[in-house]
Image: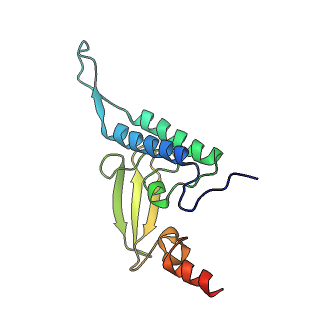
Amino acid sequence: MGKKTEPGQVLHRELYQRMNFLYQAATLMTTITTSAPTNTSTNTKKSLIPLSRFYISTMKSIGTKQVLRIDPSIKRTLCKRCDSVLLPGVTSQIRIKSKPEPQLQMMCTQCGTARGYPMRKGYQLFSEKSENIYGTENDQNQSKNK
């Protein structure tokens, strides 16, 4: 049998903190560009996007190995194909499509993958619906009635 945990205590807290750090570092690396060394004649800028991709793939592998779920709002900012952080105007293009159903289309500029997100009035993610969140008032009232 495993350890008993107190209510309100988060399991695998250190792993979630590490995944959070990797996500924040990847977002930072996506926005930063470094200058080439001064001894070269060309004035090129090198991006740190490959390092950002590595951080995201590491974050995903930690979650997969430990069977930890990544929040859907975080997943929506990641490219499924190349593990880039999708920042509008930097690594992604955003378009609004109205046919057949209104949706926001986000296209990764690194690999060209496009994802569509519904924009219906009153649309909520599964994880944001109150009946699906553990510990809400509805959940507590139902357990008292049983």
For this view, does 114 lie left or right of residue 42? right
Q: From what the image shows, is residue 109 above or below residue 121?
A: above
Among the 4 quarters of the image, the one containing residue 139: bottom right
Q: Position of residue 32 (x, y in %)?
A: 30, 36
Colour convention of the picture: rainbow
Residue toward you, 142 or 118 = 142
For this view, does 56 lie left or right of residue 86? right
For this view, does 84 lie left or right of residue 6? left
Residue toward you, 138 or 118 = 138
Q: Position of residue 56 (x, y in %)?
A: 49, 42
Among the 4 quarters of the image, the one containing residue 84: top left
- One can see residue 136 in this view: yes
Residue toward you, 4 or 54 = 4
Task: Determine the residue located farthest toward the bottom in the rendered image.
Answer: 145
Q: Position of residue 68 (x, y in %)?
A: 59, 52
Tell me what residue is drawn at x 39 percent, y 44 percent: 24
Task: Determine the residue located farthest toward the top in the rendered image.
Answer: 39
Tell me what residue is drawn at x 37 percent, y 43 percent: 27
Quarter of the figure with the C terminus:
bottom right
Residue toward you, 74 or 15 = 15
Q: Position of residue 20 (x, y in %)?
A: 45, 46
- One can see residue 83 in this view: no
